[in-house]
Amino acid sequence: MFVRLFLTTTLIVVGTILVVILLVGHFHRKYVFEPLFKDTVTFVSSYIDQWQRTVKAFDASYNPIVRDLLNVLASELETYGELSDEQITEILTKRLETLSMQYIERVNWYLISPSSVIERTNYATDLGLDIASVVPRYWAARLEPLKPGQFLIEGLSFEYRTNLPRIYGYRRLSSGWILEIGLALDPVIVADLWESVEELTQNSRYVERISLYGASFAPFGNYPPLDDEEKQCFSKQEAENDFVIQNLKGSRYKIYKNWIPTTQAGIDWSGKSAFFTLRVLMVLDFSETESMKKALIVFLSFAVAAGMILILWLSLGVFRKISEPIKRMLVEIKQFQASPLDESGDHSVETSIKEISKLQESIQDMKKQIRDQLTSLYLANRNLRQDIEKYKLDIFIDPLTRLFNRRFLMQCLEDLQRSASNIVICFLDIDSFKMINDTYGHHVGDIVLKTFVEVLRSEVRKTDLAFRIGGDEFMVLFPELQIQEAQQVVERIEKKLPNIEFEDFPGLRISVSYGFSRWSKDCGISIEEALKEADLEMYRRKKEKYEKTSRIRPN
């Protein structure tokens, strides 16, 4: 008893601790960790979004310059035709000297062929670059649709290979080529972002590190380079629409977010530009909240376990008063199950609990009722078996053919409607049977019936049911069979019958007419209608045989 109590107490305590761990873990994740996680990520994203709004001022200042340079150079190219690289560079340099703008380090020009390849440029790094291959969606959505004379001026972005700040502009020439102008800006205009990110990392309780990368995965500043796994995470669609979470050991997480700028209103940058993507890698550490959760779990586990143990010991006395009488009653019930008619195991259980006494009385009454019912059932079953053995042959079996009769057919149809999903019904009628009786006598007619039944039995399956429902009328039920398959069985019977010879009556030959119908639970007709359909089909065949025979028989 002590061992059992110890095991029970241990199981309850362990189960309680597991429940506490699950509940605290659930509430911590739902009401502490997830809101905190979301707020931290949102805070960092909002900070970067706030910074990108400040670059709109650069768009307003430098976009007109890019448009002016595109107009000037496009006009020269359209007027004078082919210009050398030096002439193009000189034209842009002279034009830029007339404009006094800060932060412009240099201006680069590009001539892009209709097939998207940079064929000429004064920026050797990009010579031969296939834009459709590097940024296919940007080429297809932004550059390729440009018509001759149309402009496309982009906002502040980062160069694909170097991450240097640039403003790009494009114009489609009449030749089909695209002229591109790129203003290379002083990196100081975005340097405050990197410094602010470092300051944000130092002041946040949960942000361990923030690293910034360009569209080509090149790092800004001194951030560590990305490995292949990190590049794959940035390449996922979730990193563009929302963010990708990578769970590190403990309570540390990596967050991958592709920040798409919105410096030009009304443009959906998602999925269109790789040049204008800022990849943000955040490493978050929630060890502090995890430690708080563990401490809370330990405290609640001890408190709940202590309470459960106390309640268990207080309930032990009451449990014993209830369990002992119930155990004795269970023993009596098992004895009753093994031998319900044996009354020697009935004993009165002494208890001070009123409810258990009433339960015992109810059990005794139930046992008495069950004994009475079992006795009645035994007598009824014995009489029924005797009656069945005595009358079943007379009731259900045809005495001449030993097939089932019409009475058994009615019962079978009721059972099959409940159990079978598909039944093929076949009516069979021996042709000219009345003439056989009249010509050869009824004793020969009986021989013909028995011979036909022998052929019938040899062809049907064991699961098929054959009935004699009248003098020369028979029926076969084919459960779970298709009409074509049942027809093959009957056709074999039909072919065998003309080959049967009767020794004393050499001129006697027999044939059969038949008709089919099919019934299923979802066919929409009753089984009685299906029987009538098979019967009519059989008589139709018989009539056709009769008419055919009448036409060829001499008058």
Image: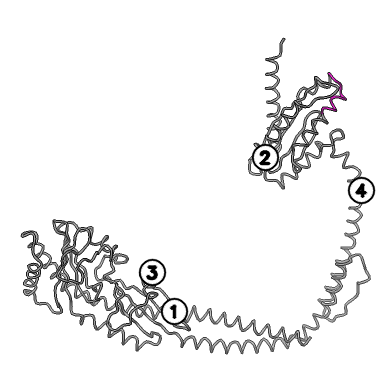
Give the number of marks. 4
Assess whether mark 2 and mark 1 are in contact (beta carbons under 8 angstroms): no
Query: Along the polypeptide, which appears first: circle 4 or circle 3?
Result: 3
Query: Which secondary structure lies at badge 4?
Result: helix
The disc placed on residue 236 is: 3
Q: Amino acid at mark 1?
A: Pro
Q: Residue 448 sits in which quadrant?
A: top right
Tell me if label 4 and label 2 are in contact, CB under 8 Å. no
Which of the two discs, 3 and 1, sits closer to the camera?
A: 3
> What residue would you read off at disc 2?
519
The answer to whether 337 appears left or right of 246 in the picture is right
Q: Residue at x 77, y 25 (%)?
A: 510
* Residue tagged 1: 35
Q: Are marks 3 and 1 in contact (CB under 8 Å)?
A: no
Which of marks 2 and 3 precedes in the sequence?
3
Amino acid type shown at disc 4: Gln
Pointer 3: residues within 10 angstroms few (<14), some, or many (20+)? some
Q: Whole-percent x and y of residue 511?
A: 75, 26
Q: Identity of the amino acid at label 3?
A: Lys
Left or right: 11 with respect to 24?
A: right
Q: Is residue 130 above or below residue 546?
A: below
Task: Check the picture and name the quadrant holding the N terminus.
Answer: bottom right
Closest to the observer, 136 or 65: 136
Q: 10 Å neighbourhood of mark 1: few (<14), some, or many (≥20)?
A: few
- Distance, label 1 to label 4, CA atoms, is 79 Å
Q: Amino acid at mark 2?
A: Trp
**Does residue 529 appear in this view?**
no
Q: Which residues are magenta?
A: 439-448
Residue 266: x percent and y percent? 26, 65
Q: Is residue 19 magenta?
A: no
Q: Is residue 20 visible?
A: yes
